[in-house]
Image (spheres, rainbow, N blue to C red):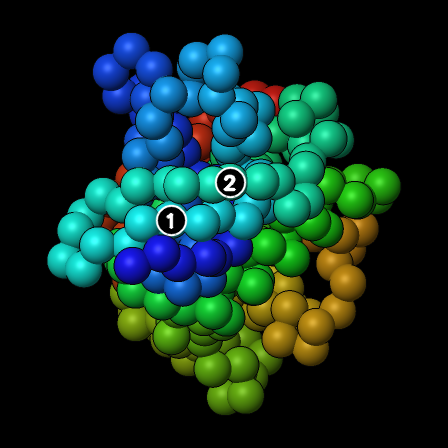
Amino acid sequence: MILKTEAICIKNTRYGESSVISKMFTVEHGLSSYIIQGLNRKSSIIRPSHISSGNIVEMVIYQKPNSTLQRVKELKVVMPLIQIHIDMRKNAILQFILEIISKTNEDDLKDIIVYQFLKQSILDLENSKDEIGNVPLLFLCHYLKFSGWFPNLEIWKQGDIFNLNEGRFYKSQLHLTEELSEILSNELHKILLEVQNHSDLKIFKISHKKEIFNILLLYYEIHILKGRKIKSPSILAEVLA
């Protein structure tokens, strides 16, 4: 069956002398792997630059049921990225976003809402003229809304702390290792509340940003990544320093 779909390039792996296996997030099938044959040949219509990470493309594919690897017939770039590929800071943020998406979605599971969120996040990053240092942290907060692990903020009261293992705010005098301090709990609540209210937080002043970012990564590892680690934050920290 021949199928046409829009997709976002996630990661490419060389296969043989001239082919590539490309991991894509598609509208129709979520995360899927595709083989692009003859990519490095001069006669190929599809060029390596067409499948650069983050590119939004349109593909015609040969879709075989129950196959873990589909074949690309045609591919064209719908929305080329320019700033992301020449700006080291933007590119580092993109790689972080794509790694989160890759490790938190199951293969061949359609999710149009997550696809549209990822697409808009990439376009916002490409077109942003504001300071982008807050983008990775805010991406993690917004993405929680699709994970089922966005904390209930309505039960929060002044003085509450946040428990990472339980994913909730409450009063506590136990000082458990998985409980945040009151200061960090307040800051996390403030950020999540702004995210819930759809505020524009690109230039929002965030106190304890590094600590909150690491807390969110740990929260992802506990509940969404199931213990898997994200590799890109170390590079991200170095580039954004």
Residue at 68%, 37% (x, y): give it.
80
Residue at 53%, 81% (x, y): give it.
153
Query: Dot 1: what SS?
Result: strand
Tag on residue 61? 1
Q: Please name whichever residue, 192 or 8, is drawn nearer the observer in this view of the structure.
A: 8
Q: Residues within 10 Å of mark 2 (few under 14, many from 20)?
A: many
Q: Residue furthest bottom?
A: 155
Tag on residue 191? none
Q: Please name whichever residue, 163 or 93, is drawn nearer the observer in this view of the structure.
A: 93
Residue under circle 2? 75
Residue 218 vertical position relative to residue 144 in the rendered view, above or below: above
Can residue 146 be seen?
A: yes
Residue at 36%, 56% (x, y): give it.
2
Residue 29 sits in quarter: bottom left
Residue 52 at what x, y percent from top left?
53, 29
Residue 19 vertical position relative to residue 203 in the rendered view, above or below: above
Q: Residues within 10 Å of mark 1 (few under 14, many from 20)?
A: many
Which of marks 2 and 1 precedes in the sequence? 1
Q: Is residue 16 left or right of residue 51?
A: left
Q: Residue furthest left?
A: 66
Amino acid at circle 2? Leu
